[in-house]
Amino acid sequence: MKSNTLRVALIGSTGYTALEVARLLLVHPQAELTVATSRADEGKPLSEIHPSLAGRCEIALQPFDPDAIAKQADVAMCCLPHGASAQSVKELADAGLRVIDFSADFRLSSVELYEHWYGVTHPWPERVGNVVYGMPEFFADQIATADVVANPGCYPTSAIMPLAPLVKAGLIQTTDIIVDSKSGVSGAGRSPKLGTLYCEANEQIAAYSVASHRHGPEMQDLIQRISGSEVEVLFTPHLTPMDRGILSTIYVRPTDAAGSTPEAIAEKLMATLRQTYLGEPFIHVVDHLPSTKHVATTNHVQMTVRVSGTSNRPGRAILVCAIDNLTKGASGAAVQNMNVMFGMNQSSGLSG
């Protein structure tokens, strides 16, 4: 390892997001995975848990010891589930590490909102609402100096990206926002569950957590933070028989400020999105309809706008956004945040 290489610790190494972090760090020119932990598989090489890493990443899994980890790493990526993550993040931060947390434990703006939706008592309540949300497109300056970064949720990324700029610009109504999202099975994690078994998930598409999914409040909370306007978001997720990817189709009503014909509204909304993301390396406002194949295994986002109705009576605007749930929706976003935190090019290790 070169003396100036950023050392990365992976906390909770058995899931898909951990594998994706390891995969991305293998090609990162300025960072290297130096620590990986697992309570259940201590002593095993990481490649035994993730065979695709065989011959490329053979570090042995360690127990969780924040002080020992702090001697071997500069930043920790915490891939633990909500509820379990916050205490580990606190201990890592207390040991002097900068931390990127993959769970929802620090994403929301209030303890009350978190405990209502996640049903657990938060172990570090004083930091809730005081941790920067890990979306460099909006919060890069805060991320650059943060000790803890809350990595965004996958579904929220696909909704916040197209919605927040349009709400902020006053171009869409804030009380009638419908987000309809389809996700690959990897979004449910690697632990066996009945609904994600092959015979259950293959050859079908199914809605789940209707009117009760925890990512709905995250979408609403972050759009409000970015735009300064209160919004109401109705979110419905669907499980689709593919490995990875999210496609969100979002239905909104334009305001009078957006224009008076479908063509004018579409042009205004597209121009606003393009101006918002001008110079952002991963956000692409496109004329074609995005699909999950267009962004698979990358940190890129594609989005577009269509508007229904006639020239005399415009209807809804339809925003379509595609991301890879494991990359821009999780591990790629974490690497992008890490790059910002340590003054590197946002695209380092993510150029594919």
Image (cartoon, rainbow, N blue to C red):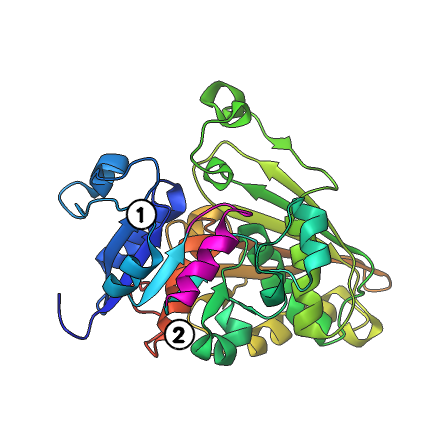
In depth, the one of 147 and 312 nearer the eye is: 147
Where residue 295 appears, as percent x and y from the top left, is 43, 53
Region of the chain picked out in magenta, as a range: 79-95
Disc 1 marks a residue whose amino acid type is Thr
Classify the position of the N terminus by image quarter.
bottom left
Please state which amino acid type lies under the numbered disc 2. Answer: Met
For residue 184, say whether it is visible: yes
Q: Callout 1: helix, strand or loop?
A: strand
Q: In terms of depth relative to the viewer, which is nearer, 323 or 10?
A: 10
- Percent across and percent down for residue 35 are 26, 54
Residue at (19% x, 75% y) in the render: 4
Identified at 80% across, 76% down, the residue is: 257
Judge left or right: residue 168 versus residue 6.
right
Which secondary structure, mark 2? helix
Residue at (31, 47) in percent of width and height: 37
Side of 6 where 207 appears, left or right: right
Q: Which residue is mark 1?
A: 37
- Residue matched to label 2: 341
The stretch drawn in magenta includes residue 87: yes
Inter-mark Cα distance, 2 to 1:
22 Å
Q: Nearer the viewer, residue 349 or 73?
A: 73
Queried whether the magenta region covers residue 1, the answer comes back as: no
The mark closer to the camera, 2 or 1, is 1
What percent of the width, then of the height, locates residue 187?
50, 41
Specify the label residue 139 is tagged with. Answer: none
Pointer 2: residues within 10 angstroms few (<14), some, or many (20+)? many
Q: Is residue 317 left or right of residue 13?
A: right
Please, which residue is most extreme toward the right here? 312
Quadrant location of the C terminus in the rendered image: bottom left
Give the image quarter of residue 239: top right
Mark before the other along the chain sequence, 2 or 1? 1
